[in-house]
Amino acid sequence: MVEEKPSGQGKNKAFIDNQWKPGESGNPGGRHKDPGITAIQIEMLDKPCPYAKDPKTTWRMWLAEKGLLLAGDKEAALRDLKDRLEGKVTLPIGGDRENPIYTITVSSEEGKKDVGRLLNGERT
């Protein structure tokens, strides 16, 4: 006699038994309401820095100077500092009119075979 499984049950019964019901949130409390550390740090950047000699020096200016001093002549440290402050520069991917770049998304196995034949010069 074959044991009948509840609808939608897979191999792992514990997973299905503890699964959320339709319309039920997996995070009922929602996202934390307090701001993250990064948000607080961003707010502080233009405020006076208590560690600076000049009271007009902001955290932004102080951190920029300290970062450069710590990086010194270490190329990797300077590059990481710039990437962190300004974001990484991305290289665009593109061709030209004579050699354009095409993007092909193939999801079926048959389609993958067809693209393979096409790239090998076969006509389908």
Image (tube, grey):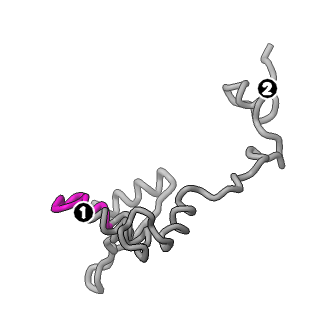
Residue appearing at x 35%, y 68% in the figure: 53
Name the one closer to the observer, 73 or 14.
73
- The extreme top residue here reads 1
Q: Quadrant of residue 86?
A: bottom left
Q: Is residue 55 above or below residue 4?
A: below
Q: Which mark is residue 69?
A: 1
Q: Going by the image, does 20 lie left or right of 99?
A: right
Q: Is residue 98 left or right of residue 36?
A: left
Q: Residues within 10 Å of mark 2 (few under 14, many from 20)?
A: few
- Numbered circles on residues, count: 2
Q: Which residues are magenta?
A: 70-82
Would you say the magenta stretch is mainly helix, strand or loop?
Answer: helix
User: Along the polypeptide, which appears first: circle 2 or circle 1?
Assistant: 2
Q: What is the C-alpha distance between the residues marked 2 and 1? A: 66 Å
Q: Is residue 103 above or below residue 76?
A: below
Label 1: how many Cα within 10 Å (few below 14, some 14–19, many 20+): few
Nearest to the eye among marks 2 and 1: give it: 1
**Which secondary structure, mark 2?**
loop
Disc 1 residue type? Answer: Leu
50 or 45: nearer the eye? 50
> Are discs 2 and 1 less than 8 Å apart at CB?
no
Work out whether residue 121 can be spotted.
no
Q: Which residue is mark 2?
A: 5
Amino acid type of disc 2?
Lys
Residue 81: within the magenta?
yes
